[in-house]
Image: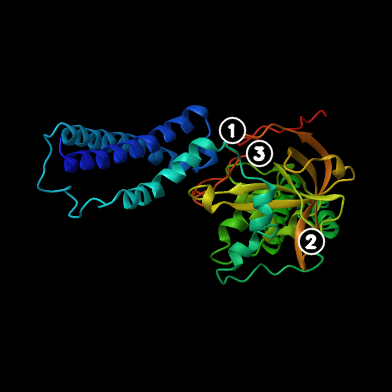
Amino acid sequence: MSNRSFALGSHYLARALLLAGFAFLVVHLVRTGNLNLYIAERMQFIVKLSALGLYAVAAHQFYLAVGAFIGSGRKEDDCDCLHEMPATWSKSLLLYGWFAIPLVIGYALPDGMLGSSMAEAKGVQFAPQTTVLSTGTAGPEQSAASPSPSLPSVPDVQAEEMRSSDDAEDGADAAESTADTDGASIEEELFPAESFTESYAAFGKKLVRREVIQVTDKRFIETLTTLDLYRKAFLGKTIEISGFVYRESGMPADHFGVSRFAVNCCSADATPYGVMAVYKDAGSLATDQWITVRGKLSTTEYNGIEIILIEAERIANITPPENPYVSPDFDFGLETISSPGEEDLEAFPANE
């Protein structure tokens, strides 16, 4: 076997090992259930298919390596990609090292979810409406004293007229019609919308009727954005949300964030979202501890902007979910909002 054949076979073998290494890494993450820590759920099928492609190309490279070692490979060309193999071992090490280093890191370092340190580096979105308003859409105009989101009763004078009506059934129908009209008017005032915020306004009208607003994984970002856009309409409403405890310098001792990372494609583009909470025993909660919080919605000012605040009433420790990250719901606004309780079971039973 000539030196040229040996060098050519070595290149093919190195490529086969690198490609197979990446394929095995994907399989390893799937089997251990840790692929969720790196890739968004909607992208995982593509990643799994890529492992099959890597296996196939690695097998072809291995076949070429065997052919070169036994002297049956092509000798007139280095490869079919119209460029020569690296001429020296130093260049070869530099080239393949760029691929080997992330592969070694992937196997050597333990798998772990993103937490407070990364959230602080990127900055938690406590005011998610800014991601909507950054498109240039004006925010909903709300006065400091917005009307109550509960539907009003019929005015006293109208009620008296209906009681004196000869036809009680017609009077009841008129009362219902008036209440519906007034209720619709109140909702329009609470949830003003432009073309870009129309879906959030429609979602808000559904949420405000719920006894407990549960921030689910499916619509984590959309729910927080709606609550922040129309925060005056939700004052005093009960909310339930799960996430990890987040703290940063400048927060009062009894305040903390309930946060989740949102990913579009992979953990590299993760953005932390969260809600500020206040709790008298907040000091007993460890940073990065996963909890479910239930409390009343309020507002506060933080870093010069008004944000929503949870006045926590109950807190439960939970284990981190199998998929700790959330993703944008690309069906938001295109499907009927499910009725309360269909998306998730409540963490706190009603009889507690």
Residue type indicated by callout 2: Pro
User: Residue 282: which disc?
Assistant: none
What residue is shown with label 3? 340
Can you identify the residue that label 1 sits on? 322
Looking at the rendered image, the disc whose residue lies closer to the viewer, 1 or 2, is: 1
Give SS at disc 2.
Answer: loop
Q: Is residue 172 left or right of residue 339?
A: right
Of the residues shown, which amino acid type is indicated by label 3?
Answer: Pro
Secondary structure, mark 1, is loop
Q: Give residue 268's position: percent from left, percent from top.
A: 52, 51
How many angstroms separate mark 1 from mark 2 (CA)? 41 Å
| Rendered image: mark on residue 147 | 2
Quarter of the image where one finds residue 1: top left
Q: Earlier in the sequence, mark 1 or mark 2?
A: 2
Q: Residue 266: give x, y in percent of width and height.
A: 50, 47
Image side of residue 202 versus residue 29, left or right: right
Q: Which quadrant of the structure image shows residue 61?
A: top left
Q: Is residue 118 left or right of residue 18?
A: right
Distance of label 3 from label 1 (alpha carbons)? 23 Å
What residue lies at 23% left-to-right and 42% top-to-bottom?
7
Mark 3 or mark 1: name the one nearer the start of the chain: 1
Where is residue 351? Give x, y as percent.
81, 28
